[in-house]
Image (spheres, coloured by chain):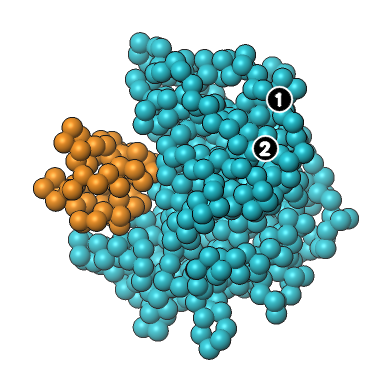
Amino acid sequence: MIIRIDQKACVGCGICEMICPGDVIVLNEQKKAVIGYPKDCWTCFSCELSCPVQAIDVHPFRKPRPMAW
Amino acid sequence: MRESWEVLEADVLVVGGGFGGLWAALRAAECGSSVLLVDKSFAGKSGHSYLAGGSVMVMLPEDDLDQYVRDVARGNEWLVDQEMVQAVFEGSYPRLKDLESFGLSFRRAGGSYVWTRARGTRVVKNLWPENATAADEVTMLRRVALSRDVEIVNHVYVYDLLRDREGSIAGAAGIGVKDGRNYVLKAKGTVLATNTGSYRGHHLACELQGTGPFMAYDAGAAIKNPEFHFINIRPAKHEIEGSGIMPAIGARWINARGNHFMEEYDPELKDRAPAFKIVLSAAREAVKGNAPISMHVEGMSEEERERFRVLQVSHGWMRLLFDKCERKEGYNPLRNNIEWQPAYEVNKLGIRSDIHCATSLQGLFMAGMARTLGINTFTGWSIASCTWSGYTAGESAARYASGSNSGAVDLDDLREKHGTFTAPIRKESGSDPDDLVHEIQKILFPVDVLIIMNGTNLQHALDRVLRLREEKAPDMSARDVRTLIKVKETQTMFLSAEMTLRACLMRKETRENIYYREDFPQPDNANWLKWIVVQKGERDEMNFSTEEIPYERYRFRPEKN
C-alpha cells in the first residue's frame, strides 16, 4: 500500500496522479501529489517506478483479505 | 455533475487499454479505420495486463499444432473451443514477430529462444521478453497505437452501451473519472476489452468488476462459463507474480508437516499442476489440518534462483518488491519459505463470441477476457489469448465499420442509461459500496464455497447474496463520481455473484483441473461435456441453458485426463 509521498522532494510533475490505476493520488493546491484514497491502493508500484525524484514509497504488504483456509 | 455532453466519434471504439484493447486498436487502425480508445485509468499503464509477469505462450515454427491444441484442450478438461485455441497458436508466432519489429526483444541463448514449460501443460512453451515485464509490453503497444493515429482518451469510465434507432450497437456512454464530464462515444464498430469480473480478491484484480461483459449481457448478448473462476495462490503478506513460474524452475509446494503434497494429488505434473488443482489440493490439505501451505524455496539450487531472478525479478515492479521484502522485512522470497494463501483473482465468465470475436449483437466485438477464452489459466495463456482476440476483434470491427452505415445514437436510450447510472448521486445518504463489496467477499471467499464446493453451501451463499442485495443494494448512494462508479461496479458484482452461484449449483460434477464439487466427485461426461450459457430474459431474469460442444468439428474428442 502507498504509505508516503515526500512533499519536499515532490516536484509536482503530475505523472503519478495521471497514471495511478486506482486514482488514489490527487494534486493539492500547491500542485504537489498527495495520497487521496489510500484504501483503494492495490500495490502495483506504478507511481514509485514512474516518479522522477523517488519521492514515493509503496509498502509491499497487502491488506488482509477475508479468504484464507 | 455536468449536464453537457462531450461527443467523440470514430469508426471503431475500443474500451480498455490492456493487451486486448491495444491490439484491437492497433489492428483496426492498420486496417484503415479511425480508432478511439478509452480507458478508465491510463491506457498501457493500468489494468490486469500491466501487472502480468510477461511470459507468453508461443508456438514456434518447429512446434506441432496438434500437440499444442491437445495440450490446452486437455488442460481445460475438453470444455474449450478448440478452434479458438488453434487460432491463438497460429497467430502467436506472427504476433511475436510484430512485437520484435516494434522493438521488444525476447530472450535468446545460442540462437534459440529461451523458454520454460507453461504451468499446467505438457508441451506448450512460454517465451520471455528480455529484461521486460508485461508492463513494458503494453507501454510499447501504447506507443505504437499512438504512432498509428489511434486517439487515446484516458480517465473515462464507460458505464453502458448505446444503440442506434435500428438497434445496432452504436458506441458507449462514459463519464470522466476525474472531472465528471459526460461522454458520448459514437462508433460504427465497438470492441469491449474490459476484462471479466472479480470481487477485489487480490491486487491484480482490484480494478476488475465485470462491467464490460455485463453491459453486453444487458444489451442481449449471452454469457458463457459463469461457473468457473481463477482462484490463485499468493503469499499471505504480499503480492508476488510467480506461483506458476517458481515451480517450473524448481520451487515446490509444502504443507505444515513438510510434505510435498502435490506428488499425491498430481503424480505427473506435481508442482506444475494447473492453478486450480494446486489451490484445491492446498485447500484439502488445510481442511485436514495441514496448513500453513508454503512455497518451498530453500531447496532450490543457486542456478535455479538465478534463472528465476533473470527471467522475473531483474526488472520492473518485481525487482522493487523483492528489494523491499529484504530491506524492510528481512526475508527473501527466493531463499526463505513463506506462507501462501488462496486469493480470488477473476471469474472466467465472458461474452459468447465467434471465431471472429463478433457477438450476437450487430456492431459489438469482444477482446481479451471479456470474451470467453477458456477456463484453465496456464502461465502465458492470458497474454497469448488476449493478443489473439484483440487482434481479431480489431480486424473484425474495422471490416464491419467499413461496410456499415450506422445511424445516429438513440437519444432516448442515452438519456435513460445516463439517468439510471447517475441516480445514486441524487440520494441523500445510503449504503457505502465498499462495505457491500466486503460483505460479498465474506460470502464468496471461504474455502468451502467456491474452491471445495457442495450444493448446501452454494445454496446458502446464494441466499445470502440475494438477501444482501435486496436489503442494501437499492440504498447505495454516491457522494462523488468516484463512488458513483463504485456503485455501478458493486451492482455488477451482485449480478455476477448470483449468476456464478446458480451456475455452480447447476454443474453437478467434478473436473479436478478446473472445478470441484465434493458432493459430485466424478466427471460426468454423459451430461456435462457442455457449456452453460446465460441470457437476460424479458423481466430481467437470468435464463440458464446448456450448449453442446461441437466436437465433430474439433481435432480432439474428450479422452481420459
Marks 1 and 2, how far apart at CA: 12 Å
Q: Chain of mark 1?
A: B
Q: Position of residue B93 (x, y in %)?
A: 65, 69
Chain letter for the part of the structure drawn in orange = A
Quarter placement of the N terminus of chain B: top left
Q: Residue at x 56, y 58 (%)?
A: B383
Q: Amino acid at mark 2?
A: Gly
Which chain shows up in cyan? Answer: B
Q: Quadrant of the C terminus of chain B?
A: bottom right
Residue nearest the observer in this picture, B293 or B327: B327
Label number found at residue B189 = 2
Image side of residue B394 versus residue B312, left or right? right
Whether the residues at callouts 1 and 2 have beta carbons within 8 Å, the answer is no
Q: Looking at the image, which residue sits at the far left?
A: A8
Relative to B108, residue B401 above or below? above
Q: Residue B471, can we see it?
A: no
- Asked if marks 1 and 2 fall on the same chain, the answer is yes
* Location of residue A4 in the rendering, given as x and y in whole percent from the top left corner: 19, 47
Q: Quadrant of residue B185?
A: top right
The quadrant in which residue B236 appears is: bottom left
Question: Helix, strand or loop at disc 1?
Answer: loop
Q: How many marks?
A: 2
Q: Amino acid at mark 1?
A: Gly
Circle 2 chain = B
Q: Residues within 10 Å of mark 2 (few under 14, many from 20)?
A: many
Residue nearest the viewer, comparing B516 with B5: B5
In the picture of the structure, the residue carrying the numbered disc 1 is B407
